[in-house]
Image (spheres, rainbow, N blue to C red):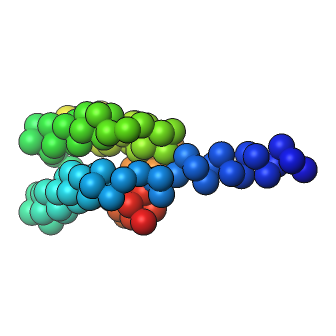
């Protein structure tokens, strides 16, 4: 029983709730900007065949992941940075990206946005 309590406490401490407010705002600015650019790109350019490569989006997501890695790190933030890195890979070659990785990394925009909101609350 005590191991379970310790595990639950450790999980809570590891969440974004222990990040300083300025880090949460920095994370929000970085990731919400990437989300906004991506939504605009999808609205303008997505076709029935899917997405086309975008070096700009690939760079934006890669830079967002790099920025997150510079913030005081915890497991949740490291995992989130990995998702952003995968989004960068996706946008460099959407047709060549393995679709099963989209599900594995929970990297759809709504999932990324939900994770962002979870981290900054």
Image quadrant assignment for residue 71: top left
Q: Residue at x 61, y 54 (%)?
A: 12
Name above or below for residue 36 compared with residue 5. Answer: below
Image quadrant assignment for residue 101: top left
Direction from residue 16 to residue 112 in the image, left or right: left
Name above or below for residue 7 compared with residue 33. Answer: above
The spot of residue 113 in percent (x, y) is: 35, 62
Q: Residue at x 49, y 45 (%)?
A: 76
Name the quadrant of the C terminus.
bottom left
Q: Residue furthest right?
A: 1
Q: Is residue 16 visible?
A: yes
Residue closer to the observer: 109 or 11: 11
Residue closer to the observer: 51 or 36: 36
Residue closer to the observer: 91 or 71: 71
Residue closer to the observer: 49 or 39: 39
Q: Residue at x 15, y 37 (%)?
A: 59
The spot of residue 115 in percent (x, y) is: 43, 58
């Amino acid at each position: 029983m005590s191991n379970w309590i310790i595990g639950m406490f450790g999980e809570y401490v590891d969440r974004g709730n222990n990040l300083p407010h300025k880090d949460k705002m920095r994370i929000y600015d970085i990731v919400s900007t990437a989300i906004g650019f991506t939504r605009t790109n999808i609205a303008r350019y997505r076709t029935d065949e899917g997405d086309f490569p975008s070096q700009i989006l690939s760079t934006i997501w890669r830079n967002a992941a790099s920025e997150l890695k510079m913030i005081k790190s915890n497991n949740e933030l490291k995992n989130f940075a990995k998702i952003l890195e995968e989004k960068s890979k996706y946008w460099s070659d959407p047709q060549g990206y393995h679709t099963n990785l989209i599900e594995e990394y929970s990297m759809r925009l709504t999932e990324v946005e939900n994770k962002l909101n979870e981290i900054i609350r």
